[in-house]
Image: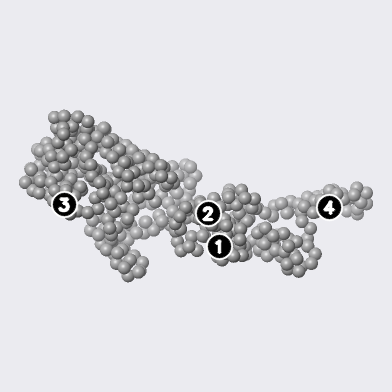
Amino acid sequence: MASYHLSVKTIKRSAGRTATAAAAYRVGERIECQREGRIHDYTRKQGIEETFIVAPEHAPAWAQDRSALWNAAEASETRRNSVTAREWELALPSEISAEDRSQITRKFAEELVSRYGVAVDVAIHAPHREGDQRNHHAHVLTSTRKLEAEGFTAKTRVLDSAKTGGVEIEQMRGLWAELQNRALERVGEVERVDHRSLEKQRETALDRGDKLSAEELDRDPELKLGPAANSMERRAKAMAAREGREYVPVTERGAVVHAARQARAAFRDMRERLELARETYGIEREAGQGRVSAGLAALRAATSKERSGGREKGDFRDRLAQVVGRSRDQDDTPKPEGRNYARERLKEIMEKDDGRDGQTAVHKLDGHSEYELGQEAGRGERRPSMKERLEGVLNRPRERLEIEDTPKKDREAENEREIDRDTDRDRGLSH
């Protein structure tokens, strides 16, 4: 499932950090910091898929040289507590291709250049070999000063101000969500990301009547593990996988994060089952099945993942076709518990309704006629169908109707009640 993440951090001298070291680490290169006289060599770093620099149109040529760019950024700052760079950390969708991930990251970088006039250095990283293999991400390092033809000039105070900084960052968060959602739509993915707070998303879900999504969003934001706890949890997961046992968190933060992720997975599973059941019910009804038969097929669809041992892979339509196919051939397929319970419940209802054999009524829902069932079971005389009773009333000779002992109005009322009972018997599920 696609997830949203965008965070903004600053590279501060007061914290002992430099723009040259930050750039060298993120792109896996060797950069000498001329101000400090130190060499930052990260050429052995792995997992870096792509790096590139985006600069304003009239920037000097040296801006494409990473070492020259960040040494110039350091030289433009004279204070001991200066902020020399800003980092935008982006989560990239695993559902799209590497080329698409590169494209949307470049568009985001170009928007930063266009909006603030800064230089942008991008490094796209692959998932850590011991971590979640969906964790594609990018580190976007930007200067804190505008880069013009003569070099670095004025500070980008719009991002530093308490009044405007939050607004600017929120707008960039919205842009990043839009870029991801367009890419997901192009590849046919249904999932979308949302940059808004959980509370805002929950209010929107309630407004559109989606109570299940609102319930899922009624939670606290996920804790950030941090480097130390994250490393410990990765080792615990790897050990559990090697020993063939279930992973158990080893840190307090890890336990909180794991519980939150399990809860979200449960809600996603519930929503997927509900959507599968609704889709199955609609297809069965369009195919001419009654409400109860379509409802039984929907129940089978909702429990289909247990038979396959968890989340099924493959196309949604293929899985749906398999479920619908099973509903057409009941005898050759093992019956899940949910479906047996439903049939037993229907049997009880039918027996209470008209005193007939409940199993016969349930078999009738599966498409068998009473005549066929009666012959197979050797039950002798069958009860006339609703159609036959209607024909009997309409085709009866007039002179015979006039000499009947039962008053005509009472007889017609009784027939109508019988017809109504047969008509209302197949209530089933409603949309």
Colour scheme of the picture? one colour
* Relative height, residue 363 to residue 73 (above, below): below
- With 112 as the anchor, is 286 left or right in this view? right
Q: CA gap, disc 4 to disc 1?
A: 41 Å
Q: CA gap, disc 3 to disc 2?
A: 50 Å
Q: Which of these two is toward me, 421 or 106?
A: 106
The amino acid type, in three-letter code, at marker 4 is Gly
Q: Quarter-wise, where is residue 194 in the image? A: top left
Numbered tag placed on residue 392 in the rendering:
4
Q: Residue visible at 47% across and 42% down?
A: 207
Q: Quarter-wise, where is residue 163 in the image? A: top left
Q: CA gap, disc 4 to disc 3?
A: 92 Å
Q: Secondary structure at mark 1?
A: helix
Q: Residue visible at 61% across and 65% down?
A: 331
Disc on the earlier residue, 3 or 2: 3
Q: CA gap, disc 4 to disc 2?
A: 43 Å
In contact (CB < 8 Å): disc 4 and disc 2: no
Q: Residue visible at 80% across and 51% down?
A: 390
Report which residue position mark 2 lands on. Answer: 320
* Relative height, residue 294 to residue 160 (above, below): below
Pointer 2: residues within 10 angstroms few (<14), some, or many (20+)? some
Which of the two discs, 1 and 3, sits closer to the camera? 3
Residue extending farthest to the left is 37
Q: CA gap, disc 1 to disc 3?
A: 57 Å
Is residue 201 something that shows in the picture? no
